[in-house]
């Protein structure tokens, strides 16, 4: 989520993003679960940004916005969900596409709930977000 200064810890005034996980050309960063959860709890809008410089142009910036009104559901492991196991109905509760969360191509769209993605698939163990989700249809291996 955005913060006032580049840091790995929560701040009060959001304006820049906090990196909780990076690899490849973006260097190596990994936040432990408790740090990630503390950062997420401070998020004013529950938006996670996924940036990938080597992905298709439609997937270089993706915004995952949770629609929960009171933080993450108890026991919900968002970090594992996006990094390792992109699951939904049948495998996990509270991650139904366009019910519990929506995907967007821009931060402005995510904030204003417009132009949400139309396609998403799930439930392949060991495959993280966004799997084959896309703005208008299936996009593989992103």
Image: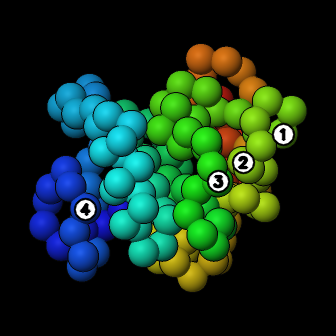
Residue pointed to by mark 2: 95
Whether tag 2 and tag 4 are in contact, CB under 8 A, the answer is no
Q: Report, in whole angstroms, how far the alpha carbon at label 1 lies from the one at label 2.
A: 7 Å
Of 104 and 140, the residue lying toward us? 104
Identify the residue position indicated by label 4 in the image: 10
Residue 139: percent from left, percent from top = 66, 37
- Cα separation, mark 3 vs mark 2, equals 10 Å
Q: Residue at x 15, y 56 (%)?
A: 7
- Mark drawn on residue 58: none
Q: Residue at x 54, y 43 (%)?
A: 78
Q: What's the CA distance linking mark 4 and mark 1?
A: 31 Å
Which quadrant holds residue 120?
Answer: top right
Establish if 119 lies above or below 77: below
11 sits left or right of 123 in the view = left
The residue that appears at 63% across and 73% down in the rendered structure is 69
Front disc: 4 or 1: 4
- What whole-number distance in Å separates the C-alpha atoms at marks 1 and 3? 15 Å
Q: Which residue is mark 3?
A: 73
Q: Is residue 137 visible?
A: no
Which of pointers 3 and 2 indicates the residue nearer the eye? 3
Would residue 70 appear left or right of 49 to someone viewing this image? right
Residue at the spot of label 1: 89
Cα–Cα span, label 2 and label 4: 24 Å
Query: Which residue appears at 50% of the width and 58% of the height?
Result: 63
Judged from the image, the secondary structure of the residue bearing numbered disc 3 is: loop
Asked if one can make out residue 90 in the rendered structure from this viewpoint, the answer is: yes
**Front one among 132 and 10:** 10
Q: Indicate the position of residue 51 as horizontal and vertical percent values.
A: 38, 46
Q: Is residue 39 above or below residue 82?
A: below
């Amino acid at each position: 989520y955005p913060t006032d200064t580049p840091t790995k810890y929560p701040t009060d005034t959001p304006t820049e993003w906090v990196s909780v996980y990076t690899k490849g050309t973006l260097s190596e960063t990994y936040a432990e679960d408790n740090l990630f959860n503390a950062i997420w709890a401070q998020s004013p809008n529950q938006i996670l940004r996924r940036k990938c410089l080597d992905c298709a142009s439609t997937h270089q910036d993706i915004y995952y916005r949770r629609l929960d009104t009171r933080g993450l559901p108890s026991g919900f492991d968002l970090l594992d969900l996006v990094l390792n196991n992109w699951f939904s109905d049948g495998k996990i509760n509270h991650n139904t596409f366009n019910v519990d969360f929506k995907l967007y191509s821009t931060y402005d769209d995510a904030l204003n709930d417009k132009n949400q993605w139309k396609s998403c698939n799930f439930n392949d163990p060991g495959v993280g977000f966004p799997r084959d989700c896309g703005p208008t249809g299936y996009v593989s291996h992103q």
